[in-house]
Amino acid sequence: FAGLSLYFEDSHDDMDDFGFDDYGSDCDGIRITAFLDAGQDNLTPLGRLEKYAFSENVFNRQIVARGLLDVLREFSENENDFISVMETVARMSEDGEPTVRAELMEQVPNIAMFLHESRPNFPAAFSRYLVPIVVRYLTDPNNQVRKTSQAALLVLLEQGLISKADMETKVCPVLLDLTEPASDDDYKIEAVAIQNAFNAGSSFMCLQCFLKDTFFELCSDSLWGIRKACAECFMMVSNSTSPEVRRSKLSPLFINLISDQSRWVRQAAFQSLGRFISTFANPSSTGLHFRDDGTLPDIPRCVSDSNCSLNSLNCNEISNCHTERSIPHTPPNQDGRATPSPEHVSTAESEDLHNFEDDHTSVLGEPHDNFTLTVRSDSSTATKSPSITKGTEQTDENFNSFHYWRSPLPDISGELEMLNCQTSVEVTEKEEKEEEEAEELEENCPDSKSSHGKATSDQIQKVLDCLQPHIADPDNVIPQPLLDQYLSMTDPARAQTVDTEIAKHCAFSLPGVALTLGRQNWHCLKDTYETLASDVQWKVRRTLAFSIHELAVILGDQLTAADLVPIFNGFLKDLDEVRIGVLKHLYDFLKLLHADKRREYLYQLQEFMVTDNSRNWRFRYELAEQLILIIELYNHRDVYDYLRHIALTLCSDKVSEVRWISYKLVVEILQKLYASRADDLGLDFINELTVRFCHCPKWVGRQAFAFICQAVVEEDCMPMEQFSQHLLPSLLSLSTDPVANVRVLVAKALRQSVMEKGNVCRLSALEETVMALQSDKDRDVRFFASMEPSKGLMDTAPFI
């Protein structure tokens, strides 16, 4: 603790002499700006602020720094007073006491947010008064002040409060100076660490300058701590560079860091390796994209093998293949951006090549612009897709690497209109002439259709043969040395020479690497994944279990069924620490499987009821939550036969939280049965609920029955006629229960839910019961029985 500065080093005995007699030893629970109140000194509030801001007592100056936000609120209405306060802040920033400077810097983000929300001239005031303080404190000799300013700078960047001009003219020059060879080693490490957290959108130009002049040199710095800091921020740097720089400049640098002589540098590099590889991902090659919320979309499950393709290629990707038939590239939109590539367009039909030859022949002269190719890694198939229609679902690729980095295309719409006017007559005459020649050729050559179809298939086969070596080549996606180093992370020798948890880092980043390589290169990672899945460390297997559903989305249903399902089955029999990862995303994984494969897991859901530690109630709680989601994946008969029994068992759990989430599961099952028109099964389930809960000897069971009845009504799980016939009589019978907590929920269910529906068969009996509850001896029962339905928002948790 020798390096820690104390905030309160001075004695508080002389506080009365400086106006803080009301504070005592603890000033956190009082108004900080009390020193601005009128006193015996006959000074104005601004005068008192000056007095205490530059007092000889350090504690006084700390209090003023801590209360600067409240001071600004007091004086924000008057422009002159506001400027005076900001000038005082600027002078206080030069205080010789480090604790005062650190206290002031802690308030800068709050002050900046207040100015941003209340001052129309925020950019000017912030840039003039506060940004220089933040920048100056980055080079403060006191370590605590520097750390505080770094944290404040990152908060300001995250909130977008620092302008791009201030970043490039004030912040970045200081950071560049800190990385000079003559700079202190601690300053260099801190500067690189700040770069690690920079937002590329707000500091992009500055970062490019940083990369160009300094970063490459820092990666080879003689101090291992600086090289380690560079390795830690490599992913951020890669995200802010062009693909060319990423491949040609950053990759060799990263390979050097992985082979560094310092173990700590190698450790940081290997921890960042998977994240660095993920920056090479391109939607046009992976066939996947992220939604706005950062999640991967579900892959539509294929009906049969012949309709499933593992990779789709844009036509302009095969323009270098020499074929007799030209395939036009995708034209750009009017705004200069390319149209989304065909791999993101849902195809309505997909057929084998044989069917394509026989059925999809065309007459001579018919345009061939409406053909797109879909290539599988395991077989050569082609699909004929119509041109992109209005209703076709597409993915916006405006922000992929290609579209982001290429220069905007010039607007040539005016020239095109003039050209079209000049050539329209010529084109019309040419088309008519071609149609006449085609008709004559068909009459003279009756076998032209079949020969044309044969030629088309031959041309397609040539294209496929040309593409095949490149489709499965991972070196086209990421540099091969990076992939080799990543695959070596499962080598036991790495754990001894680099990091004992290197396998865990490999497992954590594997979905990102798989997304980058694409499913067509999954064979490169398959052995590594299986090695990690059988690792002796349960933390490694746990990491894979938590991400297996994401990997299933990336690979698609065929590879998931072949390679992931066996590993998934192994995780189901693993330790609870591993099983919880599978359980938390059980619904997400099962919904990606075929119906027949998914149905096999109905028999294994019961196994989740058994845990290594019976006190681990959160495991059972998670199971109930997942079962609520899983209900939609199975038919009503399977739900009744398998999930019903698990739900009823969970309803009898010793832990209240598990029981109450299980009651919601029961309601969902009941809704599933009646939605599927399985009224007979629904009636059997109601009778079972009545016996188990309404007639339960324990009051918690009877209380649960009242809760279930209310939820059934609110969720419209069944027609009110059947509710009135099968559930309402039992619910009314609980109105005389000896336990007040049961009657409270009965009163709430009847008054807030059942009476709101109106179409109740036993309305007279219902009204009599409610009136009786309104006269109940218990105050809480009377309250809920008399509350208006529109005000029935009070939580009844205290009665549970």
Image: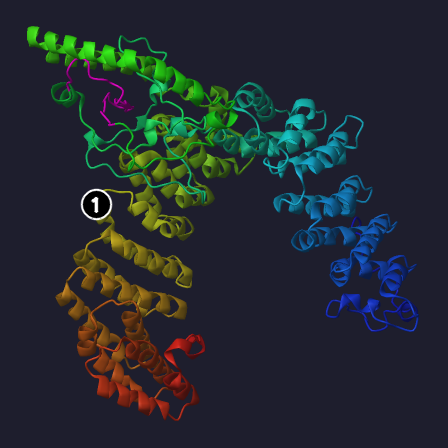
Depth check: 479 or 328 in front? 328
Left or right of residue 758, residue 683 in this image = left
Image coordinates of residue 72 in percent, x first then y, are 76, 59
Of residue 408 and residue 596, the one placed in the foreground of this image is 408
The x and y percentages for residue 166 are: 71, 37
Q: Would residue 554 be visible to someone looking at this image?
A: yes
Query: Hey, which quadrant is residue 675 in on the image?
Result: bottom left
Check the image and report above or below for 769 versus 313: below
| Direction from residue 633 to residue 448 in the image, left or right | left
Which residue is identified by label 1? 595
787 w.r.t. 342: above or below: below
x%, y% of residue 25?
Answer: 80, 69
Q: Identify the residue at horizontal 47%, vertical 44% (top origin).
A: 539
Mark 1, Cα crowd under 10 Å, few <14 / some 14-19 / many 20+, is few
Q: Residue at x 17, y 59 (%)?
A: 676
Q: Is disc 1 placed on a helix, strand or loop?
A: helix
Left-right relation of 386 to 190? left
Could you tell me residue 26's position as x and y percent? 77, 69
Amino acid type, label 1:
Ala
Q: Quadrant of the C terminus?
A: bottom left
Magenta residue span = 361-386
